[in-house]
């Protein structure tokens, strides 16, 4: 039987009272409800908005400090070859195995430059963010996973994601990035706070949404 | 024996508890362990997540000033420790303050020196929480040395998960009661009592209602000086219409929380510059939230938007986009090119959403 994703109706409280016949359905529905809670509701989840400069280029004025993101083009142009690193933290659950990722981004508007974003998974260090790498990581790359350079003065808003299909690792493991796939959390690290190291080139990362894939128990 | 559990517990096979068959040995033990485990581990993932691009959340002043603020729901009276981890650069101090309307304030303050990046761990330990939700305030200062500024890159917080066993006796979230199970009493050859059935059912109902944080966003206030050039730090102070497409978290919301009113979804907005006597409306999840005063406004909402079909198919879940709606009202009241030059219009300084 599959894991229910919703809150299915529970038997009435009085069906468990003394003098009532406890039917299989009552006990079974409790078992399924717990399966839903452990397998679907209480998964790891982190939704990171990456706040950016609020200088806007208004063509009739020039650059203006506006205190908020006032349009969807998101800021002024990227420099050629511009890159950035963003470290994000996620509190995993003891049942976490695969972390799927949705990336919200804006590609460069510099012609001839290829937007790409890599994401690796690390344990936390003691005083510095990076500990040990536990997943070699994934690479989103234009034109396969990201849109290519756009025309215009800003970067626009686009989305891409890893999908939710667990990945079959080749024997011998990985030594470099793969195409986008959910990141794997080894058993020894489940339940820990882990670090996602996001590196972007020719591309602005605007938000990173991380969700723990629910699975059949 | 105590209210123990293994981490994670093995789930009961529901086919061993179907009608017409004896209840399988171990099934009730596993269900009891799972309930104990979920009481301690449920909703202990991120309660707060936010990041800033390089060079934006920066403080050069040497006095602690309030720079960001969020609202976080309480998950149980037993989860009294909030662990906060910040990735920061440069020398300086971070001070956090956690309090509720009736919950006494607790604080923690950590300083770091050198260029970094630093992993700054803070711990806020409450007495017994007496509120549905608490406000978390972040103050930041720079320490004068060879570094020119103190910079925050990202922050996360979680309620610290608790180890086995669950403390004896009834446990609570505010006044709602959870009854943990003594594992010895639910083993094979023990009677399956009416009490177990009633308590298990009520425990499941309570665990279903425990809040999960969907979204946390705060503007950055009190920069040491107003930006004067395009290279100066200029993080958003307020929510703008440009955030609508970005602040749109994919969240699984169970159908029962969408169609019924048993389960709550809450939106918290921190409002500034609303003139006395006026009100302003915002739309989140299709629900109108009317605000008539400055400060935090927390409201329970219904889900009145359609789900994101593409993401729902990709994840095999009911995925809704949680954030400010792409709605004509939001487009007119959130900061925009039409309003930025008018300083006296109401603004949103922070937005937090949590549900089930």
Image (tube, helix red, strand yellow):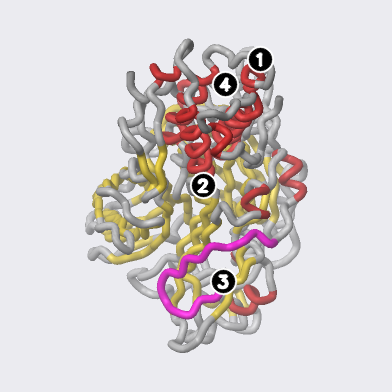
Q: Which segment did they paint magenta?
A: B289-304
User: Looking at the image, is mark 4 or mark 1 nearer the viewer?
Assistant: 1
Find residue B289 and name its label.
3
Q: Residue at label 4? A: B12
**Secondary-structure class at tag 3:** strand
Position of the N terminus of chain A by quadrant: top right
Q: Residue at label 1? A: B21
How many residues crowd around disc 1 within 10 Å: few (fewer than 14), some, or many (20 or more)? few
Which subunit holds the residue at mark 4? Answer: B
Find residue B113 and name its label.
none
Mark toward the start of the polypeptide (2 vs 4): 4
As measured in the structure, the alpha-carbon distance from the residue carrying label 1 to the one carrying label 2 is: 32 Å
Q: Residue at x 31, y 43 (%)?
A: B81
Residue B303 within the segment the image draws in magenta: yes
Does the rendering let one see residue A183?
A: no
Q: Answer left or right for B110 relative to B267.
A: left
Do callouts 4 and 1 mark residues in contact (Cβ within 8 Å)? no
Which subunit holds the residue at mark 1? Answer: B
**B281 versus A163 height, above or below:** below
**Secondary-structure class at tag 4:** loop
**B42 versus B339 height, above or below:** above
> Are the numbered discs 1 and 2 placed on the same chain, yes or no?
yes
**Secondary-structure class at tag 2:** helix
User: Does the magenta stretch mainly form a helix, a strand or a loop?
Assistant: strand
How many residues crowd around disc 2 within 10 Å: few (fewer than 14), some, or many (20 or more)? some
């Amino acid at each position: 039987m599959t894991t229910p994703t919703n809150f299915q109706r529970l038997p009435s409280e009085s069906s468990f009272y003394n003098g009532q016949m406890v039917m299989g359905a009552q006990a079974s529905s409790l078992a399924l409800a717990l399966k839903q809670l452990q397998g679907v509701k209480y998964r790891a989840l982190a939704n990171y908005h990456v706040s950016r400069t609020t200088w806007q280029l208004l063509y009739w004025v020039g650059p203006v400090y506006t205190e908020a993101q006032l349009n969807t083009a998101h800021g002024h142009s990227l420099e050629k070859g511009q890159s950035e690193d963003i470290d994000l933290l996620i509190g995993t659950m003891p049942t976490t195995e695969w972390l799927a990722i949705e990336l919200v981004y804006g590609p460069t508007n510099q012609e001839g430059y290829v937007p790409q974003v890599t994401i690796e998974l690390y344990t936390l260090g003691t005083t510095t963010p990076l500990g040990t790498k536990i997943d070699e990581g994934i690479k989103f790359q234009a034109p396969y996973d990201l849109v290519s350079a756009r025309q215009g003065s800003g970067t626009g808003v686009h989305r891409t994601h890893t999908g939710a299909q667990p990945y079959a690792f080749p024997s011998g493991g990985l030594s470099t990035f793969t195409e986008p796939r959910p990141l794997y959390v080894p058993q020894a690290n489940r339940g820990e706070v882990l670090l996602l190291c996001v590196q972007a080139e020719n591309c602005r990362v605007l938000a990173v949404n991380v969700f723990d894939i629910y699975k059949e128990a | 024996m105590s209210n123990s559990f293994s981490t994670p517990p093995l789930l009961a096979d529901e086919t061993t508890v179907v009608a017409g068959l004896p209840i399988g040995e171990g099934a009730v033990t596993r269900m009891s362990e799972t309930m104990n485990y979920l009481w301690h581990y449920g909703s202990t993932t991120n309660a707060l997540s936010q990041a800033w691009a390089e060079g934006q959340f920066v403080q050069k002043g040497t006095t602690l000033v309030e720079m960001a603020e969020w609202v976080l729901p309480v998950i149980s009276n037993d989860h009294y420790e909030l662990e906060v981890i910040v990735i920061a650069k440069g020398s300086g101090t971070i001070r956090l303050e956690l309090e509720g309307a009736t919950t006494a304030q607790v604080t923690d303050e950590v300083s770091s020196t050198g260029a970094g990046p630093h992993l700054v761990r803070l711990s806020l330990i409450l007495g017994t929480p007496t509120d549905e939700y608490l406000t978390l305030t972040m103050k930041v200062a720079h320490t004068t040395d060879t570094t020119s500024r103190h910079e925050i890159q990202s922050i996360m917080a979680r309620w610290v998960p608790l180890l086995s066993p669950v403390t004896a006796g009834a446990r609570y979230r505010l006044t709602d009661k959870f009854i943990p199970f003594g594992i010895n009493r639910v083993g094979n050859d023990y009677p399956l009592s009416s009490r177990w059935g009633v308590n298990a059912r009520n425990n499941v109902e309570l665990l279903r209602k425990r809040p999960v944080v969907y979204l946390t966003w705060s503007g950055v206030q009190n920069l040491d000086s107003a930006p004067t050039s395009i290279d100066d730090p200029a993080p958003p102070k307020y929510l703008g219409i440009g955030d609508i497409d970005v602040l749109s978290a994919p969240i699984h919301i169970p159908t029962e929380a969408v169609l019924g009113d048993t389960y709550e979804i809450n939106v918290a907005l921190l409002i500034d510059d609303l003139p006395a006597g006026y009100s302003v409306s915002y739309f989140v999840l299709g629900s109108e939230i009317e605000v008539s005063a400055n400060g935090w406004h927390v409201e329970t909402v219904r889900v009145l938007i359609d789900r994101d079909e593409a993401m729902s198919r990709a994840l095999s879940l009911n995925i809704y986009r949680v954030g400010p709606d792409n709605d004509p009202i939001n487009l007119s009241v959130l900061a925009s090119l039409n309003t930025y030059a008018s300083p006296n219009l109401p603004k949103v300084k922070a937005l937090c959403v949590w549900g089930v």
